[in-house]
Image (tube, rainbow, N blue to C red):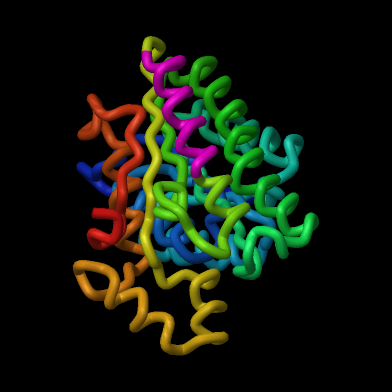
Amino acid sequence: MTESSGTNAAHGLLEDKVALVTGAGRGIGAAAARLFAREGAAVVLASRTESELSAVVDEIRTAGGTADYVVADMADEKGIQNAVDKVVERHGRLDVAFNNAGVSAAPVPLAEVPGSDFDRVTSIDYKGVWLAMVAEIKAMRATAGGGAIVNNSSTAGLRSSARLGPYSASKRAVNSLTETAAVEYGPEGIRVNAIAPGTTMTAMFQQFVEEDPDIVEQFSASTPLRRVAEPEEVAEAAAWLLSDRASYVTGAVVPVDGGLTV
């Protein structure tokens, strides 16, 4: 784990919070890490690619924020536990966590999904979120005496999504895990929510754009705001849900989708 440097922003949304962000090397996770740091949190970034993590941490520190990173495979129980342990080791506690890590697979009809793709998606998007929550909840109970978790779901987990069967099913499972944890740990002061982004200009979506350049226009046309989201817009919703300003919100799955699911 790298050493941290910099100072927290004054009077930020997440001032004095210790935050863990998974899948933080790019996309929504990287945007969230930058935002959380600007809002006053000491942020620990986790993902599999060290070069991406290092670059984001350097950006945060250059901007005056506090950031560290730990390389971890979010499908691996030991890796996830190690990431949470490093947060506590470095900062003494864990206050908030954004479980953002996720993958997709080639969009094909359900009967044509390779078993390897099914296993990969569910191991990270579903089981990985569960493993992260287990480690985070235990750390929050032991150190901070409370906290907040936001899981990154998807609009694909709120309605049928043709050709995205395993991904959609995993995101529905995340919604259920979120609601269950909110009920079970609310009495201990741990809030658990999820966000359900619509079409967002991430690396994952850009792969689809490369295959079909018209897809942006297609998705925009079906969205009331007539555009796709930037990662920073999705990160804003996660930041608010993790903050004390959302102190009476738990068990919610909040669409961040430009009205797509209305």
In percent of width and height, residue 105 lies at 64, 64
- Of residues 174 and 192, the one nearer the viewer is 174
Residue 186, x across and y down, in percent: 38, 16
Where is the C terminus found, in terms of image quarters?
Answer: bottom left
Residue shown at the point (50%, 16%) measured from the top left: 141
Q: Is residue 183 above or below residue 91?
A: above
Residue found farthest to the bottom: 213
- The reply to whether residue 6 is visible in this rendering is no
Regarding residue 234, the answer to whether it shows in the image is yes
For the residue pair 102 and 236, the one nearer the viewer reads as: 102
Residue 72 locus on image (x, y percent): 69, 48
Q: Main secondary structure of the magenta part?
A: helix
Rendered residue at 21%/34% (across/down):
245
Which residue shows up at 41% across the image and 12% down it? 188
Instruction: Give the camera-side residue of 215 and 28.
Output: 215
Give above or below for 134 relative to 39. Answer: above
Q: Is residue 180 magenta?
A: yes
Instruction: Count the labels in the image.
Output: 0
Say which quarter of the image contains residue 246.
top left
- Residue furthest to the front: 111
**Residue 35 colored magenta?**
no
User: Which stretch is magenta?
Assistant: 172-186
Q: Quadrant of residue 163?
A: bottom right
Q: How far across and down, in percent of the image, does residue 241 sit?
A: 30, 39
